[in-house]
Image (cartoon, rainbow, N blue to C red):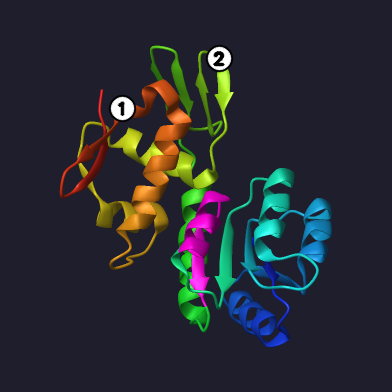
Amino acid sequence: MQRILVVDDEDNIRRAIKDYGTALGYYVTGVGDGLQAIDIIKQQEFDIVILDLMMPQLDGFSTCKRIKEIKDIPVIFLSARTMEDDKLYGFELGADDYVTKPFSVKELMARVKAILERHNVANNSSFVYEDLEIDALGHQVKIAGVKVNMTPKEFELLAYLLKNRNIAISRDKLLSDVWGYDYDNYDRTIDTHIKMLRNSLGKYRDLIVTVRSLGYKFEI
């Protein structure tokens, strides 16, 4: 049974997600603040965290940073804040998704399902180009033997482009296949993650090619 941790200071939100998630066959645990979340993650295993942004004691951004330092767990942010900069900062911290309040629990759980499915797919392939090594199973990238630090979403995007190398992929398809849903007029999500990925790849940044008026491709 896959385990979900819900971190939100609103009881009704924790209860609604727990009821719906339990009905779908998930094991759902809820806590009311970031400090409790960090404590329970140190003690128990979870497959995904649904994390409110505005909480007492420790906000969602700070909590996400601490969580990622402990374990590489997918994170979905919940927030009433709709500013694009907040969303982009959340993605830069390694979040897999950002859902604004008020939200549909049914849609939220559909996003949870899509993220869990992607993270559960075992891909045994590896890729070597000059001194660039990409280990899909080990979920790591090395350049000249030195491990490259990437967010989970950067790696997922890289792995997808690598799997479809030399094929131009549209932004819409990247959003659908890598993020797991359609999001009209949010091309900047893709562009921001491509920029982060290129920075991570350093001297190999040019392997990620921009296809004008369409999207991107990994080109050798």
- The residue at 71%/58% (across/down) is 63
- The residue at 81%/51% (across/down) is 42
Decide: is 43 above or below 70: below
Q: Residue furthest left?
A: 213
Residue 174 in the image: state x and y as whole percent: 31, 51
Q: Is residue 210 left or right of residue 115?
A: left
Residue range corresponding to the magenta coloring: 85-100
Q: Kindly identify which residue carries mark 1.
A: 206
Residue 192 in the image: state x and y as whole percent: 40, 49
**Quadrant where the C terminus is found in the figure:** top left
Circle nearer the N terminus (2, 1): 2
Other-residue count near label 1 (Cα within 10 Å), few / some / many at <14 / 14–19 / ≥20: few
Question: At numbered mark 1, what does the secondary structure look like: helix, strand or loop?
Answer: helix
Please say whether residue 200 is one of the residues in the magenta stretch: no
Residue 210 in the image: state x and y as whole percent: 23, 39
**What amino acid is labelled 2 in the image?**
Gly
Residue 41 in the image: state x and y as whole percent: 77, 55
- Res. 176 image quadrant: bottom left
Decide: is 84 above or below 166: below
Q: Residue furthest bottom?
A: 12
**What amino acid is labelled 1 in the image?**
Asp
- Frontmost residue, 164 versus 99: 99
Q: Kindly identify which residue carries mark 2.
A: 145
Question: In the drawing, what numbered circle is on residue 92?
Answer: none
Q: CA separation, marks 2 and 1?
A: 20 Å
**Quadrant where the N terminus is found in the figure:** bottom right
Q: Is residue 98 visible?
A: yes
Q: Is residue 95 left or right of residue 1?
A: left
Do the CB atoms of the residues marked 2 and 1 lie less than 8 Å apart?
no
- Res. 70 image quadrant: top right
Q: Is residue 133 left or right of residue 184?
A: right
Q: Nearer the viewer, mark 2 or mark 1?
A: 1
